[in-house]
Image: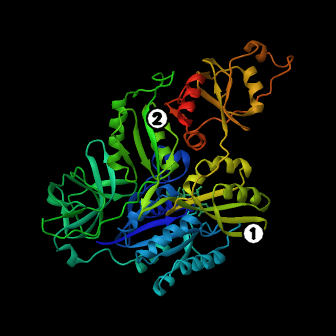
Amino acid sequence: MEIRNIAIIAHVDHGKTTLTDALMRQTGMSSDEVSMDSNALEQERGITIYSKNTSVFYKDTKINIVDTPGHADFSSEVERILRSIDCVLLLVDAQEGPMPQTKFVLKKSLELGLKPIVVINKIDKPAAQPKEVVEMVYELFLDLGASDEQLEFPVIYAASKQGFAKKELNDESDNLDPLLDLIMEHVAPASSPEASDLPLLAQPFNLAYDNFLGRCAVCRIYQGKIKSAQNVFVETLAGKTRPRRITKLFTFKGVGREEVQEAEAGDIIMVAGLPNIYIGETIGENAEQSALPAIKIDEPTIALNFLVNNSPFAGKEGKFVTNRQLKERLEKELEINVGLKIDFSETNFYRVFGRGELHVAILLENLRREGYELQVSQPQVIIKDIDGVKSEPFEEVTIDVPEALSGVVIEKMSKRKGRMSNFKTENGQSRIIFDIPTRGLLGYRNEFIVDTKGEGILCAQLSGFQPYVGEIEKNELGSMVSMIVGKALAFALWNLQERGVLYISPNTQVYEGMVIGNVSKGNDLTVNPIKGKQLTNVRASGSDEAIQLIPPMPLTIETGLGMMNGDEYLEITPLNIRLRKQFLTEIDRQRAKRVKTE
Ligand SMILES: Nc1nc2c(ncn2[C@@H]2O[C@H](COP(=O)(O)OP(=O)(O)OP(=O)(O)O)[C@@H](O)[C@H]2O)c(=O)[nH]1
Ligand SMILES: [Mg+2]
């Protein structure tokens, strides 16, 4: 059977998964209820975290589809996938137009010589402007140096949520056949019968983990056939060849996978039986075959320490609380989390290197759900020496805000060493583009939401390493630190709430050294959150002068990582997220400060 291999790429939320789901449904591969965003965290957050494979069948052809994540922290994964498919569907929201990740993924596709199909999606939106968006996409192709051939990209209009696509806006269509036909027409067949007769060559571009099978590799077969129980050779990136045996073989089908005995050139499959297999290695039939070109893996950009929980409340809520359990779990994570690196050389903590705050936050969220308790230190960017120059990661940040708020955004971004590269205002909405060191951006998101009253959109995309820009002054908020263990009282919190923003509500158990809120002005403040009138007085509202408490801002892993200070830990348990001082008592903190300044 003929095969076509495509990936769906776009900015976050432009509808990749919705389109993948719709394609599966229309071709009878799945029913209404199922989605490619199958992971619990994905469903809660409404975003794709892990790229996933599926296939659909259309007119006697198998179309392998990779649904990719749109969020910038996972964009290095997209790059790997692009190496292993033959064409991309570049989805662009018909209202929003091209966004930062549109540019990033298109740039990578064009560099690899791919000829994208442009899908203008969400044309059903009332404010859709499909024709204008096509113009913008064309401009973007030009800006990114597309070749003449790439510039002749086919365009199709779609509403994936409604399940239809059409070549011209005034065509009648109630299904996705026009898109499927375009794929058949535009995407080259993945292989030829002759290629299947050559000796096997396949290459993993993604890893998966199965509780029974262990580490598995998602591979593209470039030539030959691969069989269950076949003896193969794996050539590592360092050029070492080792004999291995395939134990099981799967193809992707709908939202699931299907065990098969054999697959041939062009197909995308998952293989088991190759422990330690890694992305970009070559799987061949004999030891002498030359290796396929390696696949580049992007380097981490931020680092932080993971350590077991040693807060006064440690061990109360988690199932896995020891150093050894944490280490084993992190080692398992390394099996499949490709952008992640961990240094296990220290005994008291493990240094974890990741691709961004969300990348690390997802790992932490998974750990707490599995029953782990741990603490992490403030994330820091990775500083590198590039040809003798001290360098740090930079991001391109696109900000959309109502015009009236652009001033405060520009002021804050400049303070954090952001350089404005573009500023445009249309219909009272401003779009501002900055180049900013990741270091400057860390912790800004929460401030941004407050400054723009939730009306702004901030999108960041790593652009690479640039020379270090020196000290960055952030007006870090001080912390409100409990001086005592006990149960927080409404009366005490009522007195404290005018000093800053509280993270806790009445009745929350606190301990000495726990951070219960931030202080809008100045330094840390040691406070007593359990002091007060008796709780019963407070409860008797109505007649009493009722205490009006501002709703607290509960900590999440992401806000915690963004707001924590350098001398704090974020404590993560299955039930709670707390912020604490590394040194719990005031005396110890003062002493530590003295030692540091000496
Ligand atoms: N109106 C309209 N909404 C759509 C359409 N397609 C998708 N959406 C909505 O857009 C939102 C995002 O859709 P997803 O398919 O999750 O987007 P995505 O590109 O996979 O997002 P990430 O994987 O997180 O990057 C959802 O609320 C969809 O219901 C469409 O054609 N029309
Ligand atoms: Mg998605």
Helix, strand or loop for disc 2: helix
Residue 117 point in image, percent of width and height? 48, 75
Residue that badge 1 annotates: 425
Residue that badge 2 annotates: 368
Q: Residues within 10 Å of mark 2 (few under 14, many from 20)?
A: many
Q: Residue 84 appears in which quarter of the rendering? A: bottom left
Residue 596 point in image, percent of width and height? 54, 35
Q: Residues within 10 Å of mark 1 (few under 14, many from 20)?
A: some
Is residue 515 shown to the viewer in this render?
yes
Is residue 579 shown to the viewer in this render?
no
Taking the spot 34% from the left edge, 49% from the top edge, the residue there is 336
Residue type at the position of mark 2:
Arg
Residue type at the position of mark 1:
Thr
Q: Residue 291 appears in which quarter of the rendering? A: bottom left
The mark found on residue 279 in the picture is: none
Eyeballing the image, is 204 above or below 134?
above
Eyeballing the image, is 47 above or below 126?
above
Left or right of 542, for residue 419: left
Left or right of 60, for residue 146: right
Residue placed most toward the observer, 553 or 269? 553
Left or right of 460, for residue 549: right
Eyeballing the image, is 55 above or below 361?
below
Taking the spot 44% from the left edge, 50% from the top edge, the residue there is 354
Label 2 or label 1, whichever comes before in sequence order? 2
Label 2 to label 1: alpha-carbon separation: 43 Å
Residue 426 point in image, percent of width and height? 75, 70
Residue placed most toward the observer, 250 or 49? 49
Taking the spot 76% from the left edge, 17% from the top edge, the residue there is 539
Taking the spot 47% from the left edge, 61% from the top edge, the residue there is 20
Residue placed most toward the observer, 410 or 293? 410
The colour scheme of the drawn protein is rainbow
Give the quarter of the figure containing the N terminus: bottom left
